[in-house]
Image: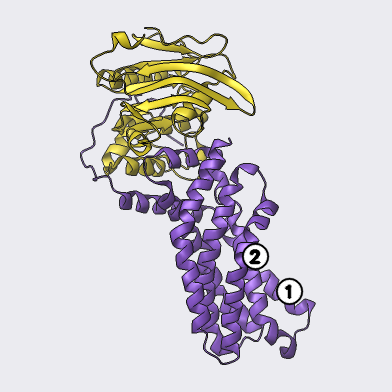
């Protein structure tokens, strides 16, 4: 756990003694963890334990009251742009525009990745099971289908660290299994994933779990 | 709908064949394109300010007097005030849908500076809701007996002025995004900063109506627009960050 057993590669993302306060209420404190390349970290805890807050805090959307976050050894305050360019955050609300079609939504996300390949986007939609819906506005899609549009980004993104807040919400079993495989593949390729989920995630070996809530424990292998 | 639900769910990684070098300009233009598609599909939101502008100007002569002696002197003021309020009204919901569907978070964490990307949003909004307003203005000017030599100045001053109004108003809209229905609060925040634009805008038109040279006023309006163009995006980005962290 401590620095004595430091791995040869430096941690991608490390948090030490983080604390987060919302509306005068302490959500968590003294939270430390390290995320290495290849790690899959699940945040766990009862509703209201601060999973989403921690996620948003890691993504830089919430200020934290105490502690330090470092990205590849540098304090996050000094290399935020660097971090953002290697990080993909998909929150509860995934930024899918209801007025636009799935394809048009993906165009924007692809532009952020520098991907300029129409066939690839169509292929991505086909793979997430939305073939034939390219031109329907997203408000006609079901919740699960919208989620699939959001997760289609994962198929072509080149970013290293994925922060996924409840990625499995509204997805059917087949899709959950497929996403689990995708996460595994990403981690084997040297990426890292942090996700929150209430699903059991049985298919994922070397899943690390960070429990928020009653008593905070560190990451356990 | 004859779409088969039997399509395989594979979720395999795809390797893009064609990659752009990551640069801000391509992202900026992609952002503009997306905004354009979005705002064109919200036709009601685009029509609202235009209808408001037209209604105020049409009702004004009915309420006061339809004679030239009364209308001609107040025409510059009425046109400008109505246009200003129409712009203000159109801005209220600029960022709220984005906050509600998570696009705003994505904008802030996408790895590109938020200022140029929010500028894209405001510019598209300006193109789609203020430029039609400018095109409509001469028609309403004729109704208020605005002399012909002032029509050009009316359009030019509104064009420059509405850009400043949009950019400054967007700061207020961004600040009040997280506050729910915030029309009044935003108006109070932004209105003081609208005063110079209103003064120089009507000043330019008064000059043109009186047969004087309006260049000085227009130059000042242009300077304000440039200043807003450079500075407002940063303020908008900072305000959006505050709005998102309050969620």
The answer to whether one can see residue B86 in this image is yes
Chain A shade: yellow
Task: Count residues near mark 1 (Cα–Cα under 10 Å), then give few for <14, some for 14-19, many for 20+.
Answer: few
Image position, residue B221 (x, y; %): 51, 73
Q: Secondary structure at mark 2?
A: helix
The answer to whether one can see residue B43 in this image is no
The colour scheme applied to this rendered structure is by chain
Quadrant in which the N terminus of chain A is drawn: top left
Image position, residue A29 (x, y; %): 53, 18
- Say which residue appears at 20% left-offset and 39% top-offset: B17
Say which chain tag 2 marks: B
Quadrant in which the C terminus of chain A is drawn: top left
Relative to residue B196, is residue A127 depicted above or below?
Answer: above
- The residue pinned by badge 1 equals B59
Q: What chain is colored purple?
A: B
Q: Tell me, for residue B85, which label it has, or none.
A: 2
Q: Residues under labels 1 and 2: Cα distance?
A: 15 Å
Task: Count residues near mark 2 (Cα–Cα under 10 Å), then give few for <14, some for 14-19, many for 20+.
Answer: some
- Say which residue appears at 28% left-offset and 41% top-offset: A115
Say which chain tag 1 marks: B
Image position, residue B182 (x, y; %): 67, 49
Relative to residue A36, is residue B197 depicted above or below?
Answer: below
Image position, residue B140 (x, y; %): 62, 78
Q: Tell me, for residue A40, which label it has, or none.
A: none
**Nearer to me, B47 or B35:** B35
Q: Quadrant of residue B63?
A: bottom right
Q: Secondary structure at mark 1?
A: helix
Q: Is residue A97 left or right of residue B90?
A: left
- Say which residue appears at 31% left-offset and 31% top-offset: A159
**Nearer to me, B18 or A189:** A189
């Amino acid at each position: 756990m401590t620095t004595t057993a430091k791995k040869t590669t430096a941690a991608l993302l490390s948090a030490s003694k983080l604390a987060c306060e919302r509306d005068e209420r302490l959500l968590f404190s003294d939270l430390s963890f390290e995320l290495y390349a290849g790690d899959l970290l699940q945040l766990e805890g009862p509703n209201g334990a601060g999973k989403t807050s921690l996620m948003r805090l890691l993504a830089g959307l919430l200020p934290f009251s105490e502690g330090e976050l470092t990205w590849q050894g540098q304090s996050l305050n000094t290399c935020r742009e660097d971090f953002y360019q290697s990080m993909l955050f998909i929150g509860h609300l995934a930024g899918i525009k209801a007025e636009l079609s799935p394809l048009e939504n993906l165009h924007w996300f692809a532009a952020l990745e520098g991907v300029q390949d129409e066939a690839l986007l169509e292929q991505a939609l086909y793979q997430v099971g939305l073939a034939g819906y390219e031109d329907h506005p997203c408000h006609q899609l079901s919740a699960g289908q919208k989620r699939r549009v959001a997760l289609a980004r994962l198929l072509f993104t080149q970013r290293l660290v994925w922060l996924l807040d409840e990625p499995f919400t509204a997805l059917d079993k087949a899709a959950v299994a497929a996403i689990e495989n995708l996460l595994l593949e990403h981690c084997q390729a040297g990426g890292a994933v942090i996700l929150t989920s209430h699903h059991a995630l049985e298919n994922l070996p070397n899943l690390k779990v960070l429990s928020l809530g009653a008593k905070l424990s560190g990451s356990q292998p | 709908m004859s779409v088969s639900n039997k399509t395989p769910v594979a979720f395999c990684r795809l390797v893009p064949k064609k990659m752009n070098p990551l640069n801000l300009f391509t992202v900026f233009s992609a952002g503009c394109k997306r905004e354009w598609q979005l705002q064109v599909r919200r036709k009601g939101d685009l029509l609202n300010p235009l209808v408001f502008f037209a209604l105020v100007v049409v009702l004004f002569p009915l309420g006061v007097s339809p004679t030239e002696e009364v209308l001609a002197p107040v025409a510059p003021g009425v046109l400008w005030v109505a246009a200003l309020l129409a712009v203000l009204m159109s801005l209220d919901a600029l960022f709220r849908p984005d906050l509600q569907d998570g696009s705003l978070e994505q904008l802030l964490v996408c790895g590109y500076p938020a200022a140029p990307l929010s500028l894209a949003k405001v510019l598209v909004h300006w193109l789609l809701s203020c430029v039609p307003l400018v095109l409509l203005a001469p028609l309403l000017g004729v109704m208020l007996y605005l002399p012909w030599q002032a029509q050009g100045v009316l359009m030019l001053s509104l064009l420059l002025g509405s850009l400043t109004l949009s950019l400054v108003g967007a700061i207020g809209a961004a600040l009040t995004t997280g506050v729910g229905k915030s029309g009044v609060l935003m108006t109070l925040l932004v209105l003081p900063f609208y005063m110079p634009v209103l003064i120089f805008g009507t000043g330019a038109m008064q000059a043109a109506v009186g047969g004087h040279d309006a260049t000085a006023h227009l130059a000042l309006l242009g300077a304000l627009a440039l200043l807003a163009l450079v500075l407002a995006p940063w303020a908008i980005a900072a305000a959006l960050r505050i709005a998102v962290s309050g969620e």
